[in-house]
Image (cartoon, rainbow, N blue to C red):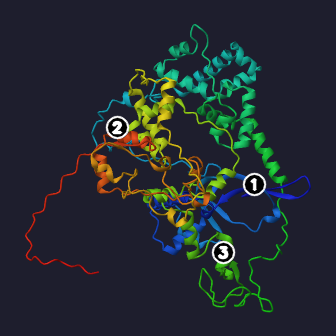
């Protein structure tokens, strides 16, 4: 859909609405669209279609957006029909019509979301009233009608129609007199004619009929109710409650947003309720102001462009395969092999061929499939190239991946990802937690699980579910203030002394020329330990003494590229960016599991928080081996072993 208009320099531009195909949105949104399509097929009971028809129906589905663009009219190539998908439509019928599309969801290019274009009717006893069974003949209704409904009018009364009409005339006169006494109404309706017109609207007549019903259709009592001792009753509707400036704002908002009352109220009239805006709109449509604007719009539509001349598009197609010295379209075009066929229909004969896909794959389409591709943005049959593109864009969910694969998805694991992140402009920012979030941490600890979430920073948290559960539990939560556990802090001198004790020893550089290190030796295991635990334990642990073994290189494993002989402790920790180690997997053995059993839970947590500190383990003495019985030798001759 588009509107053509003249620009300042005389050119013609088209104001168009942007629609998106499935190939323009992400894989997650495609999954959401597939789920919506399955629900629609189940609810509307669509006939069964083949897999190829399902594939082609995805090309007919578009996603509407609220985004507008102005393009030159020369870019228009044709016209098509885009309709809102109705529950009575048959999806297979769109395949029988040329250049016919449908949409049911709205895509937001900024928020990257898909929403329904229209509200859904909720069916069920929770949303709709249950219709009781029909009463049999002679059966009485035992329900109390006064509790179910309120009676506002009873036609079988003692008054006749002329008497009721006379009472309504008196009610209009009372309303006109009440507006003359009211200062605000006399300013808005300065003339008697305008006051009488305002008093003749529906709200005055409805109040008069309600007054008759409440007074059992007694005219004397009803008249006394209309004119009490304090003065006449004044009934005003939304047309009188709104000022002239508010009405002008409403007309301006209506021209900008249309009948989107939520946006009108949010941007122009936030002090009005949504019900007030809707009531004013339907009353405003009965005024002369609405009729005048309708005539002006009709005159503007007549003055707009009725026909735009679009010149023929004569630019050459860069995808067209032209064979030098041959007619266009013959097999054996330059750069393409003779045995290639159409990627869609697999035909080998065509009047014209077009290059399609990446140049290195040398894919091509015939003339009919190329026209289908340009119209619908896809091929008639799914191809291997489309499957590869989908598999590349839609990665495996992280729930089915190992820890090492998930860590590989992080941009910090590769040097290229780190370079891209460092190349961005660094801006100072602050993450300030709201009060509701801090409350949710306390109230919904079992759902949020902050300790588990801190260990898995890449796992997503359903914030909407936590927020909804917090709003349910918040009224029932305890009102007593939470006491913070104050931890006594040691003095500064004590902290400095502990840091001096825990500092790693500075290695002394050997005197003389440094011994060159062979790179092949760097990959060999260092030390005499044969264990593969997180901390190296020497073989002398079995002596039963408490040993304190520091972790090599200040809590980090040796990697290739580190020099350990003549460099200081600080310099030797700098690893070349190209020699950065891969994620290390620690395999626990029976011996390391036995060591863990001799550590308490608090000691293990303390060791995990401070991996650079030594761990003191006191192991029991191993059982002594049994002495073997000395058997007498069967012969006294010496035994000779030859190599």
Residue 283 locus on image (x, y percent): 66, 34
Of marks 2 and 3, the one in the foreground: 2
Give the distance between the C-alpha atoms of the residues marked 2 and 1, in whole angstroms.
63 Å
* Foreground disc of the pair 1, 3: 3
- Badge 3 crowding class, 10 Å Cα cut-off, few under 14, some 14 to 19, many 20 or more, is some
Mark in the foreground, 2 or 1: 2
Residue 134 in sight here: yes
Task: Give the Cα distance between marks 2 and 3.
Answer: 60 Å
The image quarter containing residue 625 is bottom left
Residue 227 against residue 407 in the figure, above or below: above
Which corner quadrant holds the C terminus?
bottom left
344 up-or-down from 283: above or below: below
Q: Splitting the image into 4 quarters, where does residue 389 fall?
A: bottom right
Q: Residue at x 53, y 73 (%)?
A: 53
Residue 538 or residue 340, whichever sits in front: 538
Label 2 crowd (10 A; few <14 / some 14-19 / many >=20)? few
Position of residue 216 in the picture relative to residue 236 (left or right)? left
Q: Disc 1 vs disc 3: Cβ atoms closer than 8 Å?
A: no
What is the distance, in whole Å, between disc 1 and disc 3 at their CAs? 28 Å
Q: Which residue is mark 2?
A: 602
Residue at image point 71% right, 87% down:
351
Q: Considering the image in quadrants, where does the N terminus appear?
A: bottom right
Q: Which residue is mark 3?
A: 357
Q: Which residue is mark 1?
A: 69
Query: Looking at the image, which is closer to me, 129 or 426?
Result: 426
Placement of 633 over or under 35, stated as above or below: below
């Amino acid at each position: 859909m588009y509107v053509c208009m003249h620009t300042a320099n005389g050119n013609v531009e088209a104001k168009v609405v942007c629609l998106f195909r499935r190939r323009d949105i992400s894989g997650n949104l495609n999954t959401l669209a597939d789920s919506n399509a399955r629900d629609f097929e189940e609810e509307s009971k669509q006939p069964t279609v083949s897999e190829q028809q399902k594939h082609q129906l995805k090309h007919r589905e578009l996603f509407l957006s609220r985004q507008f663009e102005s393009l030159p009219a020369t870019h228009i190539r044709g016209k098509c029909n885009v309709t809102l998908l109705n529950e009575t439509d048959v999806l297979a019928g769109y395949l029988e019509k040329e250049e016919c599309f449908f949409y049911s969801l709205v895509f937001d290019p900024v928020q990257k979301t898909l929403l329904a274009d229209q509200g859904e009717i909720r069916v069920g006893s929770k949303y709709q009233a249950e219709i009781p069974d029909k009463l049999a003949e002679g059966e009485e209704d035992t329900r109390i009608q006064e509790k179910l409904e309120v009676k506002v009018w009873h036609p079988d009364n003692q008054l006749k129609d002329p008497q009721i009409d006379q009472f309504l005339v008196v009610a209009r006169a009372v309303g006109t007199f009440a507006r003359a006494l009211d200062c605000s109404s006399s300013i808005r309706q300065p003339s008697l004619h305008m006051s009488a017109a305002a008093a003749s609207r529906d709200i005055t007549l409805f109040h008069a009929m309600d007054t008759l019903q409440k007074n059992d259709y007694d005219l004397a009592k009803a008249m006394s109710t209309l004119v009490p001792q304090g003065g006449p009753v004044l009934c005003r509707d939304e047309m009188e409650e709104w000022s002239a400036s508010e009405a002008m704002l409403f007309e301006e908002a209506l021209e900008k947003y249309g009948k989107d009352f939520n946006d009108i109220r949010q941007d122009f009239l936030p002090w009005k309720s949504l019900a007030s805006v809707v009531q004013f709109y339907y009353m405003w449509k009965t005024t002369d102001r609405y009729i005048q604007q309708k005539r002006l719009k009709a005159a503007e539509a007549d003055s707009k462009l009725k026909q735009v001349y679009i010149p023929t598009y004569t630019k050459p197609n860069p995808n067209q395969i032209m064979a030098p010295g041959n007619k266009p379209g013959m097999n054996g075009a330059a750069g393409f092999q003779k045995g290639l066929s159409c990627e869609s229909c697999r035909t080998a004969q065509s009047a014209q061929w077009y290059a399609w896909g990446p140049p290195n794959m040398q894919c091509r389409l015939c003339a009919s499939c190329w026209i289908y591709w340009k119209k619908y943005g896809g091929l008639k049959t799914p191809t291997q190239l489309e499957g590869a593109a989908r598999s590349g864009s839609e990665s495996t969910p992280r729930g089915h991946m190992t820890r090492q694969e998930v860590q590989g998805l992080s941009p910090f694991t590769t040097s290229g990802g780190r370079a891209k992140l460092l190349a961005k402009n660094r801006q100072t920012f602050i993450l300030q937690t709201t009060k509701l979030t801090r409350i949710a941490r306390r109230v919904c600890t079992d759902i949020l699980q902050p300790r588990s979430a801190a260990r898995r920073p890449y796992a997503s948290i359903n914030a909407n579910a936590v927020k909804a559960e917090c709003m349910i539990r918040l009224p029932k939560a305890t009102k007593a203030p939470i006491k913070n556990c104050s931890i006594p802090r040691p003095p500064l001198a004590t902290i400095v002394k502990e840091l001096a004790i825990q500092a790693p020893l500075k290695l002394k550089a050997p005197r003389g020329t440094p011994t060159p290190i062979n790179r092949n030796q760097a990959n060999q295991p260092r030390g005499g330990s044969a264990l593969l635990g997180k901390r190296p334990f020497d073989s002398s642990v079995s002596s039963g003494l408490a040993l304190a073994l520091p972790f090599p290189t200040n809590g980090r494993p040796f990697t290739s590229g580190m020099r350990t002989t003549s460099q200081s402790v600080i310099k030797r920790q700098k690893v070349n960016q190209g020699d950065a180690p891969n994620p290390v997997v620690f395999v626990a053995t029976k011996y390391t599991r036995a060591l863990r059993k001799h550590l308490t839970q608090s000691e293990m947590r303390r060791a995990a928080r401070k991996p650079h500190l030594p761990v003191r383990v006191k192991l029991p003495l191993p059982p002594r081996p049994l002495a073997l019985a000395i058997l007498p030798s069967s012969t006294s001759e010496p035994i000779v072993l030859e190599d």
